[in-house]
Amino acid sequence: MGDDRSPDVDDPPRASTLDVPEAVHYDEEERPARELAGWVGTFVAVVAFGVALLVLWQVFRPLAQGSQYYLIIFLAGTLPLCFLAYKSGFGKGREAPGVTDWILAGVALLVCLYPVNPFAGGYNAFLDRQGLLEPVDVVFGAVLLVLVIEACRRTTGWALPVVCLLFLGYGYYGGLLPQHWPVAHSGLDFAQIVDALYNSGSGFYGTPLDVAATYIVLFTIYGAVLDLSGASRFFVDLSVAAFRRSRSAAGRTAVAAGFLLGTVSGSGTATAVSVGAVTWPMLKKAGYPREQAGGMLAAAGVGAILSPPTLGAAAFIVAEYLNVSYLTVLGWAMIPTVLYYLGILLAVEIDVRRFGVRAIEAPATSAWRLLGRFGYHFSSLVVIVVLLALGESATRSVVYATILAGALSFLDRRSWLTPPRIFAALSAGVRGVLPVVAVCTAAGIITATTTKTGLGAQLASLLVSGAQAITDNPQAVLALTVVLAAFALALLGLAVPVTASFIIGWVIIGPALLTLGVPAPAAAMFVFYYSVLSEVTPPTALAAVGASAITGGRAIATMWQALKYALPAFLAPIAFVLTSNGEYLLARGPFLDVVWTTAVAALAVLGLAVATGAWFPGVGPAGVPSRVLAGLAGLLLLYLELPAVIAGVIALVVAAVLARVQPNRPRARSRFRSRFRSREEA
C-alpha cells in the first residue's frame, strides 16, 4: 500500500521514521505491563474497549445517578484489568495471568460494584449509610482498600503503597500521639477510615480518580488514535528535516521531536524512549557520548509532561483543585514550557561548541514538503485549543479532536483507521490509563486522611514556623519556605509518581504557600513543576533510566546529565512564588509586564545554562569565575524585582567579559574536546 506515491515526500526516509509498536502508550508512572496474547489478550482488549465506550458515552450522555456512580462503574471496569495486565512481581513472573490474578480481578469487580448492588439496597441506600456503615459495608470497603494498594504496587512499585500505609497508620494511631504535638488528632477507628474512603467524595471516588476517569483517559485515547494515524512518525521526520543543515542538527532534532511527541503522549519516559529509538543513531554519529545523549533525551522527554495541549495528568488535577478551565492551565503553562525548552536548547548549543560535535549527513527531505503533505496532523491539536477557547468543555474538545484525527488518517494509506485499528486504539488508550487509575485511586487514601485529620494544615503550619524560627522578615520567610518546599517536593518525587507527588505536595505544601500570600495559581504551578522534576532527579529518574536503556549508557551518569540539561529551566518556577511579578510568567497580568518578565527569565535561564555548561554562547569557554557569576546572575534575575534584575544583568555581562578575556581559550577548548573524545572512545 502506498507504493504509487512519491518516495521523497509520501514515504520519508527510513532512518528518520519512528519505529515503535503501534498504539503503545506509557504513562510516566507505569511499570512494564504483560504482553497478553491469545484469548486473554482479546478478553482484556474487549473489556478495555467497553470501558472506552462508557467514557465516551459519559461525555455526551452522563449517567443520571451522578458522577460518583459513574466513577464506581469506571473503577469496576479498570481495577480488575490491573491484575490481569500487570505482573505481581513474585515468583517467575509468568506472562499470562495466573489463578491468583483472576481471583483478584473477580474480587475487585465484586467489591467495586457492591455500592450499586440492588440486593443490598442499591446505590441510594448505600449513600444513606454514609457515616453509619454496616459491618458488611466495612468488610467490602476494607477488601477494596487492600486491592487498590496491591494494584498500585503492581503498576508503580512499592513506594506509593508504603506512603499510603503510613497515612493509614497515622489516621488510625494519630490519636495516641501526645495531644500537645501539632500533628496529633483525636483518632479515627477503622470503620471511620473505611467510610471516608469508600462512601465519601474525598476517598477512592475523589477528585484524582474523577480527573483520571473524565479527562486523562480521553487524552490517552486521543494519543493512541493520533499515534496510529501516523502523527508520531511525521513529528520525528519533521524534526529531522527541519535541522538537517545545522552542526547541532542531531541535538536539536532530539529536543524538537521530544516536544512534538510530547503533545501526543504526555508521558516523559515514553517520549524519551520513543525519541531515543530514532535519534540515538544520529546522536552517536555526531559524537555524543552515551550518557550525554541519554541525558538530553530524558530532559527532552520530560518536556512532554509540560507541553500543551496534552500536559501530564497532574495538570488536570490542577484545573479541578482550583476550579478553573483546562484552557486556563494551558495558558499558565505556555511561558514556563518555552523557558524549559530554551534551557535545553541552550545546553545543546553549548555542548556542540564546547565539545566540537560533528555535523552529520541527513536525508534530503524538505521540511516544507513534509509539512505540505502531512501537516494536517497538527489540525487536531489546534482544534483542541480552538474549541477550548470557544467555551467547549475539555472532554468534548478532545473527543472532537480524536474524531478529526481518525478522519484525517485516511489521507495516508499506511495509516487508515479501519475498524480493527479503531478497536486497538480505544483499547490501548484505556490500558494506558490503568497505572494512572491505580495511582489516583490510591491518592484518595492520602487526601481522605489529610481531610479527616487536618494533617495538611498542621504540616503547612510547621513548614512556615520552621522558616519563621530562622528569620522574622516576611520576604525571607517566604524565600526559605519556597526553598524548603522545593527540596521537600524533590525528595517526595523520588518515592512516588508525578501525579501522586503533586497531590501530596498540594495538600501539604500548597496551604503553606497560600498562608504566606502566594496566589493559588502560582502555588499550584510551583508544586506541579517541582513534582515533575523527579523524572530527571537521581536516583529514581525514570525518564533517564529509559533513555539509558536505549543508548547503553550508565543509568546514574545519565541521570546527572539529564539534571544538567533540565535544571536551569526547573529553577525558573521559583520565580512564580517569590514576588508578585512572578505571576506574569504564568501570563497573568498586563501584556507588557508579561513580556519583560519573560525576557528577564530567559536571561536567567541563559545564566544558569552557562553555570552548568561551562560555556558562554557566542563567547567561548567559561572559567570558574565566569560560571559563578553567571549562576549568581541567573538567581538574581529570577527574583524579578528591578534592583535584582539590574544586578543580575550586570553580573551576566561581567561573566561574558571574563569568558572573553579568559587566557588560553583555544587550549581550554582543546582540553574539553579531548576529554569528550576520550569518553566517547571509552
Image (cartoon, grey):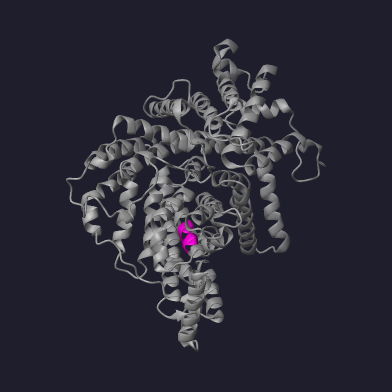
In the rendered image, residue 675, in percent from the top left (x then y), is placed at 51, 76
Above or below residue 649? Residue 559 is: above
List x then y, in percent, for residue 174.
Answer: 76, 38
- The mark total stands at 0
Asked if the magenta segment contains residue 297, the reply would be yes
Q: Is residue 218 visible?
A: yes
Residue 193 horizontal side relative to residue 25, left or right: right
Work out whether residue 255 can be spotted. Answer: no
Magenta span: 293-299
Is residue 150 positioned above or below 570 on the image?
above
Q: Is residue 611 magenta?
A: no
Q: Is residue 269 above or below residue 149?
A: below
Name the residue rendered at 58%, 20% in the picture: 110
Q: Is residue 135 left or right of residue 682?
A: right
What percent of the width, then of the height, locates residue 102?
57, 24
- Location of residue 222 by image quarter: top left
Q: Main secondary structure of the magenta part?
A: helix
Q: Quadrant of the N terminus?
A: top left
Foreground residue among 324 and 78: 78
Where does residue 295 sit, x and y in percent of width and height?
Answer: 50, 61
Q: Write the residue at 23% across / 60% down.
A: 366
In front of the other: 608 or 496 = 496
Question: 580 left or right of 275?
Answer: right
Q: Depth check: 489 or 267 in front? A: 267
Residue 491: name its quadrant.
bottom right
Answer with left or right where residue 47 lies relative to residue 473.
left
The residue nearer to you, when weighing 343 against 575, is 343
